Image (cartoon, helix red, strand yellow):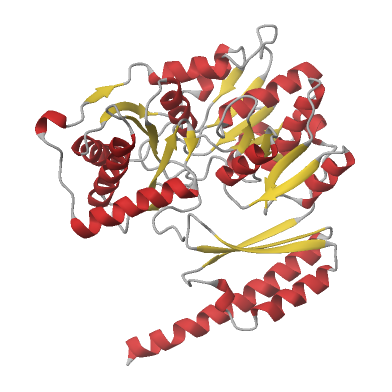
Amino acid sequence: MQREFFGTDGIRGPVGQGKMNPQWVMALAWSIGRSLTQSQPSRPTVLLGQDTRASGPMFTAALQAGFNAAGVDVFLAGVLPTPAIAYLSRSLSLSAGLAITASHNPHQDNGLKLFMDGQKLSDAQELAIEAQMRLALSQGWQAVPSAQLGRVARLEDARGRYIEFCKSFWPSDLSLKGLRLVVDCAHGAASGLAERVLRELGAEVIAPFSEPNGANINFHCGATAPQALQTQVIQQQADLGLAFDGDADRLLMVSSTGQILDGDHLLYLLVQASLAQGQQVPGVVGTLMTNMGLQARLQQLGIELVRAPVGDRYVKQELLRLGWQLGGENSGHLLNLAKVQTGDAIIAALCILQHLQRSGQSLAEASNSLQLWPQVLINLPWQQAQVQDCPDLQEAVNDVEQALAGRGRLLLRKSGTEPLLRVMVEAECEQLAKRLAKQLADQLRAWQQQLERPEQTKVES
């Protein structure tokens, strides 16, 4: 079945429009709460946290009301990274954890990421919640009797608990003393938290993007705009830089020379770290977007790469199916199931920093044995339902694939979080990748314009 409400990574959209309005969110919380009360013998309890968006408190109030109306108790965690919500909800044996965040999107958007037992939901769980939600929207819903209403409490020192959890992964015989780091928290949920973890482990930390005001989250900074960190690392003469996204489940890094290392580079460093510790790495799970250069390098090491659909929960599903530990996306979602059960950018950063400290290598030195193939990605605004409806699409795709002739690959994918069509061409030759990506994108734009013209003509008449 097709999911109606959930996307690639939870629910997301413009604040006040479509799903992301208080009334709809309240009904969703009631639906989730109803599902929990029907499946659990005792009163369910949910942990709510948020990133730094101005709309976060509004949605916290709506979710709290919906859960309480369904007879679910709520713990409020305040501003907290999404991985912290996953960890704390599991460590406290709560029924679920819910992060109010639109991740790397601008502040005008918000969203919801739901965890049960510290893990993102399966497709089947999301479909079950959607079925309950459709009933609530079509038949209405009402609160349980007053004596059964859920209650609300604040989880004391939620940030401190998570900070200590992160630090527990750092070995006692190592220190970050002498290391100068620039940390870009994207004015998001990791602001003030990631810096504290690293400072308490001994590093000198410069944090130029840790002053959230409700509207500056991800604005020209963070993991989706690493050029800001790149500039800061060079200006501050730092050893390296770390960039998180708004809810701190994505990580990118910048070397002392200004080289930006994406998720493919960092996944390779996690492989290196595991091998250096004498651990076996039979295979790694990437996605359809994983660079072929990483695949080729892993093959040289005798390590298999398996590709999952885009989305870190699909990466995890493959890891569990195969019994492997390491996986990730080039966007910066990284999974190390030997450490944690969900993508956690701060812990991934600590694993890589530990490897660098033990090996005595710089970030550039540790990553220079991986050569990624040039990858050109064009994001097209896209409102159409199916790209397959584009006339002569297969012929256009065949033209690109014939031009690549085994020297690269083409991927067309609708975004699961934004109204975009992603056209990605990867090739050993950058000029070839650029030319073919533009060629196909131009054809798709022309087709979309043809569809829009009849509507424009009707409006004008």
Residue 68 rendering spot, x and y as whole percentages: 21, 34
Q: Quadrant of residue 96?
A: top left
Total marks placed: 0
Quadrant placement of the C terminus: bottom left
Is there any visible trace of residue 78 in the rendered image? Answer: yes
Q: Of residues 240 and 89, which is closer to you in this image?
A: 89
117 to the left or right of 168: left
Residue 265 drawn above or below residue 430: above
From this viewpoint, which residue is outermost toward the top?
Answer: 173
At x 80% / y 47%, what residue is drawn? 295
Residue 39 rendering spot, x and y as whole percentages: 34, 37
Residue 168 rendering spot, x and y as whole percentages: 57, 14
Q: Of residues 32 and 209, which is closer to you in this image?
A: 32
At x 29% / y 26%, what residue is drawn? 42
At x 60% / y 40%, what residue is drawn? 316
9 to the left or right of 20: right
173 to the left or right of 428: left
